[in-house]
Image (cartoon, rainbow, N blue to C red):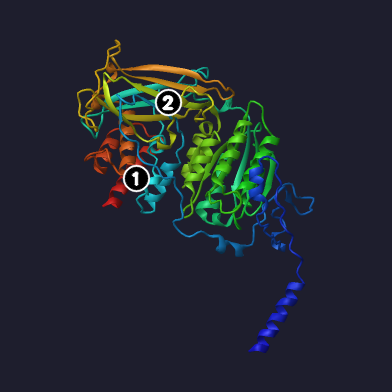
């Protein structure tokens, strides 16, 4: 037995001695943010081996890709890390990360008449909720951001005629479907819809996570197909680069004309997953590429495609946000595209997009990729207004209580509204943004106990106004905000039967989101009521998104039993 073991070991050592020494992967050196450098500097350098079959694939060096010296090699391909690493880096199930938040609370107009928040055009929560329901699970409450469910859908709002005023506000008031004592104030804004031919040239950097955790069809496989859809929308005026990261970072594709789709698609097709996740190195290198090819008066954007599982490198959350914010100020924005399950980091993806002047989408199907990266490409890439803030002041003669539905992590202090140094959300071309307040009119029973010492309000001849709406925004290249404002009057109130389909469908989505969270304010309103409201207000549905929503409500109803 021992003799056999000794012979086997001798043979193994002899075989190993005949192999080439494995090259060490070099990490990218960065000079921008000292904090990030320190955190990245001590990370282990993974070793990459190359077999004869892999000779034409890319080796990630951390700064540039080392290619085989062949005259026919006209582009780079990513060299997959050893497959033996995959099993050790696959995450356990249900290691997903979500930011905890409490529901918006009821406010007294007497003590707090003003509400201020940043807009939100993210839709990631809706697609993620859909994924969970389709997997047979009721979503955890922190995965449900009601405003992202509402804003997943486009609404038929009036839009501006030119970019001088990039959006218009639309308001509608009718009784609440779930509370006979309350009304819903529906605020909708729609951005100017710039046609594709008018879109400025784009400098896009695809930052792709090729770590071991991405080794599944719903992650790297779907990611490749999704980005191929986007490249088909590019023109000769656009530039596309590809940066990858695992244990190290590397450039897979130098800036390439957007109409060279075969070359871009071929680079994407060669990507393979393996290794740990040094996302910080990848982000640094992607920004370096974007800044080197900056397009003046154009779109300069990084699209990071990942499951968000940054388990090696700069995992300090605030440091990552600080880096993204610094680069945003230099003209490079960041959009996050989330993929996968089990270890998905929703919190990181949403917050990075927020500070990067971008939007966050979760891609669970190729249909969703087509929605975000084809149908809504201008909204995704082309910002028409930044730092958009909404402030509403309720008239205490008319309204006694209110609550904002959703937008929990978009709250701003009232003084932040006029402070141009305070960052807020962006709106893309053609984007619609919807906010819904549930309000209690004077004389109706609200949620709060009556105040003993509440004073009578002195009339200022504004009793025909329910509220006063103000919106601040900046042009994409400006640092000083502009103000838009409108009164909201009592004569705008409609009966629920007279309300628009847009109003009623948005209310159905809002109710659904609240049911998934806990339904605190919905009284006896249930999934069947949501279904009735949604079916009766579906209206035009050219892409089938509203019909799909109705199916999801039915699915949630069955799972909740």
Q: In this view, does 456 lie above or below 423?
A: above
Crowd rating for badge 2 (residues with CA inside 10 Å; few <14, some 14–19, many 20+)? some
Taking the spot 24% from the left edge, 33% from the top edge, the residue there is 447
Q: Is residue 141 above or below residue 160?
A: below
Label annotation for residue 366: none
Give the left or right position of residue 254, taking residue 536 as reference: right
Please indicate, yes or no, whether residue 158 appears anywhere in the rendered image: no
How far is disc 1 from disc 2 in space, using C-alphas?
A: 37 Å
In the rendered image, residue 227, in percent from the top left (x then y), is placed at: 57, 43
Determine the secondary structure under disc 1. Answer: helix
Q: Quadrant of the N terminus?
A: bottom right
Which residue is labeled 1 in the image? 552
The answer to whether the residues at label 1 and label 2 have Cβ atoms under 8 Å apart is no
In the rendered image, residue 281, in percent from the top left (x then y), is placed at: 64, 47
Give the left or right position of residue 390, taking residue 554 as reference: right
Furthest-top residue in this view: 461
Give the left or right position of residue 61, taking residue 485 as reference: right
Question: Which of the two marks, 1 or 2, is nearer to us in this view?
Answer: 2
Image quadrant of residue 25?
Answer: bottom right
Determine the secondary structure under disc 2. Answer: helix
In the rendered image, residue 518, in percent from the top left (x then y), is placed at: 30, 44
Image quadrant of residue 176?
Answer: top left
Q: In front: 479, or 232? A: 479
Furthest-front residue in this view: 453
Tally of numbered tags = 2
In the rendered image, residue 295, in percent from the top left (x then y), is placed at: 67, 30
Q: In this view, does 337 lie above or below 472?
A: below
Which residue is labeled 2 in the image? 414
Please indicate, yes or no, whether residue 22 appears anywhere in the rendered image: yes
Taking the spot 45% from the left edge, 33% from the top edge, the residue there is 120
- Quick one: label 1 or label 2, which is nearer the N terminus? 2
Crowd rating for badge 1 (residues with CA inside 10 Å; few <14, some 14–19, many 20+)? some
């Amino acid at each position: 037995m021992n003799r056999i073991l000794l012979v086997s070991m001798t043979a193994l050592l002899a075989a190993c001695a005949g192999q080439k020494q494995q090259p060490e992967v070099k990490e990218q050196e960065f000079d921008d943010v000292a904090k990030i450098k320190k955190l990245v500097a001590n990370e282990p350098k993974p070793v990459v081996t190359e077999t004869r079959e892999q000779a034409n694939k890319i080796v990630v060096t951390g700064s540039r890709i080392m290619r085989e010296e062949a005259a026919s090699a006209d582009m780079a391909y990513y060299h997959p890390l050893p497959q033996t690493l995959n099993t050790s880096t696959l995450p356990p199930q249900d290691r997903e990360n979500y930011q905890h938040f409490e529901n918006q609370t009821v406010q007294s107009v007497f003590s707090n008449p003003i509400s201020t928040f940043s807009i939100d055009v993210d839709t990631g929560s809706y697609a993620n909720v859909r994924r969970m329901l389709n997997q047979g699970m009721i979503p955890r409450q922190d995965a449900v951001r009601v405003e992202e469910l509402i804003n997943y859908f486009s609404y038929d709002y009036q839009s501006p005629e030119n970019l001088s005023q990039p959006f218009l506000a639309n308001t509608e008031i009718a009784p609440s479907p779930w509370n006979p004592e309350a009304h819903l104030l529906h605020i909708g804004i729609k951005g100017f819809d710039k046609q594709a031919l008018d879109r400025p040239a784009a400098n896009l950097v695809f930052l792709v996570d090729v770590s071991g955790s991405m080794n599944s069809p719903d992650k790297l496989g779907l990611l490749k197909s999704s980005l191929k859809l986007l490249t088909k929308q590019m023109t000769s005026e656009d530039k596309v680069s590809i940066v990858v990261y695992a244990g190290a970072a590397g450039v897979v594709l130098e800036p390439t004309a957007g109409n060279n789709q075969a070359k871009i698609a071929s680079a994407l097709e060669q990507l393979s997953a393996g290794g740990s996740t040094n996302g910080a190195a990848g982000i640094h290198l992607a920004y370096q590429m974007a800044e080197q090819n900056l397009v003046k008066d154009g779109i300069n954007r990084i699209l990071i495609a990942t499951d968000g599982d940054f388990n090696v490198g700069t995992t300090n959350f605030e440091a990552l946000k600080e880096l993204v914010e610094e680069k945003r100020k230099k003209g490079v924005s960041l959009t996050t595209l989330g993929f996968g399950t089990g270890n998905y980091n929703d919190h990181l993806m949403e917050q990075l997009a927020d500070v990067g002047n971008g939007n966050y989408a979760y891609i669970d199907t190729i249909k969703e990729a087509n929605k975000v990266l084809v149908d809504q490409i201008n909204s995704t890439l082309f910002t028409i207004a930044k730092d958009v803030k909404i402030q509403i002041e309720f008239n205490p003669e008319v309204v006694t209580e209110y609550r904002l539905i959703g937008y929990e992590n978009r709250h701003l202090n009232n003084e932040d509204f006029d402070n141009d140094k305070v960052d807020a959300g962006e709106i893309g071309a053609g984007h619609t943004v919807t906010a819904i307040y549930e309000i209690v009119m004077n004389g109706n029973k609200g949620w709060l106990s009556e105040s003993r010492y509440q004073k009578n309000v002195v009339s200022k001849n504004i009793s025909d106004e329910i509220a006063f709406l103000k919106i601040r925004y900046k042009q994409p290249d400006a640092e000083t905000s502009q103000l838009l404002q409108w009164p909201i009057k009592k004569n705008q109130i409609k009966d629920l039967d007279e309300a628009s389909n847009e109003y009623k469908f948005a209310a159905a989505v809002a109710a659904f989101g609240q049911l998934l969270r806990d339904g605190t304010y919905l009284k006896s309103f249930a999934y069947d009521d949501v279904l009735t409201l949604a079916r009766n207000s579906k209206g035009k549905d050219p892409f089938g998104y509203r019909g799909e929503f109705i199916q999801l409500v039915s699915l949630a109803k069955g799972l909740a039993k």
